[in-house]
Amino acid sequence: MRIILFSQIFAMLTVLGVVGVFAIPFLAPSIGAANILLGLIQFEAIAAVLSAGISYSLPPIVGIMKGENVLILTHDPMRNRTIVKIGTALETKKKGQEIKVISGSAPETGIVQEYSGIVTPARVSIKAEENIKVI
């Protein structure tokens, strides 16, 4: 869930753009108000594109960080259903590696399937218990 990162980067770039746009009249007084407004709109567009690009490209670089929320998927073969839970990563790992996650009280080991998106958390797939006893 990189929406917070996206918002922070966008806010920082917006502040830089506004400061830059309002510094223009002091540096070049011949530029009109319409050009200043157009410059502000261009800075906002650049800030949105850079924020989305950084938020999208950061997860493959750093992976899943320790303490990050993850979506835990477990397939139950007995009932033919998928159980979905929210958990917390206990390690820093990349896609395809085994990772320890905790949901509730017991830590579990799973495989990182996907990194987090701008709104969605990272997905970790956990194998169902293989020691199923039939009574």
Image: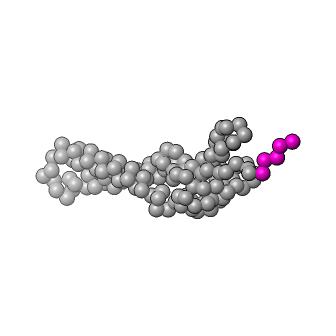
**61 w.r.t. 40: above or below:** below
Q: Quadrant of the C terminus?
A: top right
Identity of the residue drawn at 15% across and 46% down: 32
* 134 in the magenta segment: yes
**93 w.r.t. 43: above or below:** below
Q: Residue furthest left?
A: 30
Q: Position of residue 9 (x, y in %)?
A: 41, 53
Q: Is residue 85 visible?
A: no
Main SS of the magenta part reads loop
* 30 in the magenta segment: no
Q: Position of residue 114 (x, y in %)?
A: 52, 51
Which residues are the magenta region? 131-135
Task: Residue 33: name its quadrant.
Answer: top left
Q: Position of residue 101 (x, y in %)?
A: 66, 55
Q: Position of residue 19 (x, y in %)?
A: 31, 54
Identity of the residue drawn at 33% across and 50% down: 49
